Image: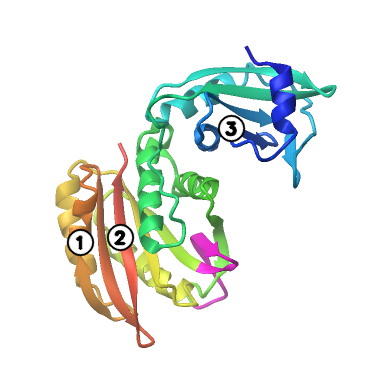
Amino acid sequence: MIDRHTISTLLGSTSFKNLVGVGMELKPYELALLMLRALDNSEEYGYIVMGVSKLINNYAVVGLSLTVKDSAKEPISIALSLISVELEVEYDNIDVNGKNVFVIKLKNSPKSPSMNFTRDLDSQEGFIKNLIVACLTLQARKYYSNASEDERNDYIGDMLAAIGYNIKDQTRRGSSSSGKGSGELDIFVSKDRLPFTVIEAMNLSSLSTNYINEHLDKIFSYDTSGNKFNVCLSYVKIADLNSFWERYSAHVANYDYTAPLLSSDTSIDNEYGYSELRLMKTNHSRSGRTVSLYHICARIH
């Protein structure tokens, strides 16, 4: 049972770690992350309250105009499937201070629930790990089996934004391949209002070298600041990923980049070892400094 007095008390202070107050978030992957935040404490129960806004010392009850209990069933179910352990959950609309809010009550598990994201948001290693976790969750969603590149990019960008990265997609920046005006970045990530990394993505059903080359060139032309690292992310729909990867990795290790190639490393793939995902890194010389380009190929079923 969701106790109204308990919720009112928790909303009275932002110091309670077992409550997450938000406006209205019903995207499953965002819900999953909110659930993990609500349970990242020693309390028996965690709560997500929708229809409030966070102030300095407490939450203001804004209220919701709709009763969302029935429409919330599916996204909550999907969110729970993204978390690695089973949780006891109940949810309902309740009245707090005369206003309608929606509450999700979660019982903490003795096992620590996780989507395996790292909280290291500052390093390139932490970012790559979080990007790989986002790719793994994308692979598990049947909806994206036949999705467009933009739809897949939106999912990846939303996942990264939900854990704290500043994400902009399809940002007008840099120069286009034709040299006419600005080009479009697939996913642009900034940190402390400064460029952090660029993700250039593509859907592949074969080793289309000309198409791949265009994207490899775009990364360096769009990255006008010269990031320490960028990412080329391929959503690969192909029967034999291993054969594809052997040819892809050989191609990018021998390509004539606009930023001269210094070295390539496929051994970092061993750190993860997933059969449906591959990873390598190429290092490049740019204005006297070494920068890295990560290549990730995620097989989409």
The local crowd at label 2, few if under 14, some if 14 to 19, many if 20 or more residues have their Cα within 10 Å, is many
Q: Quadrant of residue 114?
A: top left
Q: Specify whether 249 is left or right of 299.
A: left
Which residue matches tag 2? 295
Mark 2: which secondary structure? Answer: strand
User: For the residues carrying marks 1 and 3, which lies nearer the camera in this image?
Assistant: 3
Residue 233 within the segment the image draws in magenta: no
**Mark earlier in primary sequence (2, 1):** 1
Picture residue at 54% right of the left edge, 76% below the top: 180
> Is residue 145 in view?
yes
Which residue matches tag 1? 249
Is 257 or 159 nearer to us in this picture?
159
Q: CA distance from mark 2 to mark 1?
A: 9 Å
Which kind of residue does numbered mark 3 sit on? Answer: Asn
- Colouring style: rainbow
Q: Point out residue 19 in the picture as x, y percentages from the top left corner.
A: 62, 32
Q: Point out residue 296 in the picture as x, y percentages from the top left corner.
A: 31, 55
Q: Specify whether 131 is left or right of 179.
A: left
Picture residue at 52% right of the left edge, 23% below the top: 44
Q: Which residues are magenta?
A: 179-195
**Mark earlier in primary sequence (2, 3):** 3
